[in-house]
Amino acid sequence: MHPKVRIAVSGPGSGAGIAALINGTTDICQASRKIKAKEIDQAKANGVSPYEITVALDALPVVVHPQNPISELTFAQLSGIYTNQITNWKEVGGSDAPIVALARDTNSGTHVFFKEHVVQMKGLSTEDKSLEYGPKVLLLPSTEGGATEVAKNPYAIFYPGLGYVTDEVKPLGIKKTADDPAVLPSLETALDGSYPIARPLLYYTNGEPTGVTKAFIDYCLSPEGQQKVTDVGYVPLE
Amino acid sequence: MWGNCLKGKIAPMLQRGASTATADAGLAKSLRRRWRFGEKAIEGWIFLNGLLAIVVLLGVLVLLLREGLPIFAHTPPWEFFFGTRWYPISEPPTFGVMPFFVATLWVTLVATAVAIPVGVGCAAYLAEVAPTKVRETVKPIIELLAGIPSVVMGFIGLMLLSPLVQSMFNLNTGLSGLTAAIMLSMMSLPIIVTVSEDALRAVPDDFRKASYALGATRWETIRHVCIPGALSGIAAAVMLGVGRAIGETMTVLMVAGGALAVPYSPTEPMMPMTAAIASGIGNAVRGGLQYQALFAIGLILFVMTLSVNLIADRVLERQKRKFAR
């Protein structure tokens, strides 16, 4: 459609993309978390006004090694694991083995999303905004690296995207609280909203998109574009 | 220096020419002038090149200082250097680089400890024992090792070495400072081997002959004559290898694990300073606090590698003077 338009895709994570938008080095950035108020201020100071478009949804599975007997965890347990309060699998009903908690590094929107919604338990009665990833959590530069490590390491736990759930890792059922039913991550449970760790996938542009940027966004939101969303393991908008 | 040497060779030549053929005196004069002009131009060009290197170095230093120092208005130097909490994107952010600094020390220390015996042993074999044919095939291969991109080394560490390290040392995870250090030692081997080998070969043959004449075996000669004789060169080789290990980024980012706790043992997951910069700079907004803090880490790294390289330079200079005749 637009043979002369070249799109260079780069960037290690949402923070990097938003930083690039603020610094004016990109026309459009992808993000797996909402832009922060502070970032909007920084953008405004640089003469950039971020405009948000939701293009897809993503369920964030929590995976362990297939040999790990654990099959479900609550938000509180996940929060305990990622703040290093819980360091042995037997504390959450598993075998007597150490827990190796893997996370993405601070470049990643997933890092921030998981911190706010799971570690700090946003929206639950136990929400605590002072909670942070514990110092023993491994911060990895790529989702691929984390998925590889979980496939090899029986102690590991990680949160890759739905696209990374293969036979080599075991996704856990997630419970909001101990009384809620455990829900496994899938396209269906993400679509009907029953899987609790889901998030929007966003595009940010400088002001309302125009020209080729608008054409690109329109394509993403078209039935054809949304089919592509499903093909690569994410959840379409409807 | 080169200009002077040129002058020394050509000027007398021209003078000789002028004295034998007086008729061409005018021509010789103009030739001489042209030579002088060319020589001046070359001298100037070389001088500019030398200057450029210094300007770039100073530019880097100025940039690091300008972008990095403002962080100390937010976090006092004491807290910055000795703080153990690094939460750059939290509210309020805290910047303590102690975990990164200790991680860099561990990784470098272990990498050096692994690389020295292997590297120097290899160099001693190549310089003293190996037949010429073996040396001429092995040395280029070792030098080729330096050409492997660090991301490939990181991948090898991730896929092959980390499971091995995990099972060998019975660790919770193979993503650890130790795994990174072993990969780094392999990456600094080429420098250590080539520079040490050159140093060993620079030891005068008289020394060896004298040693053999006293009845020493080949091992005793290597151990007590060649290696001590080349010690300053070997030390320089090690320093250069250390400089490489401190500055290496991609490999440690991929395999060191990236935990933010101050590591008490090299077998723990850790995040050395280079990895901290690489994993944070992407989402740092220019001029923001995290950006400044990362540049300040860069400044620490710069000072560390610069001092290591300066020491290496000093030591190499001493080695050269030792055998200069």
Image (cartoon, helix red, strand yellow):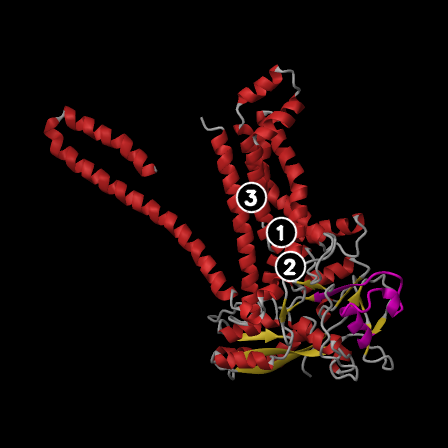
Q: Residues within 10 Å of mark 2 (few under 14, many from 20)?
A: many
State whether residue A9 appears in this view. Answer: no
Task: Identify which amino acid the numbered label 2 is placed on.
Answer: Phe
**Gap in angstroms between the C-alphas marked 2 and 3:** 21 Å
Residue of label 1:
B152
- Along the polypeptide, which appears first: circle 3 or circle 1? 1
Disc 3, SS: helix
Residue of label 3:
B240
Q: Quadrant of residue B197?
A: top right
- Residue A21, above or below A68: below
- Along the polypeptide, which appears first: circle 2 or circle 1? 2
Foreground pick, A83 / A213: A83
Foreground pick, B264 / A192: B264
Magenta residues (range): A74-103
Residue of label 2:
B100
Foreground pick, B265 / A97: B265
Horizontal side, residue B14 vs residue B47: left or right: left
Task: Identify which amino acid the numbered label 1 is placed on.
Answer: Val
**Gap in angstroms between the C-alphas marked 2 and 1:** 23 Å
Image coordinates of residue A227 in percent, x first then y, are 66, 76
Judged from this view, the residue extending furthest toward the left is B23
**Residue at x 50%, y 40% (from the top left corner):** B314
**Gap in angstroms between the C-alphas marked 3 and 1:** 22 Å
Foreground pick, A59 / B79: B79
Horizontal side, residue B27 vs residue B75: left or right: left
Disc 1, SS: helix
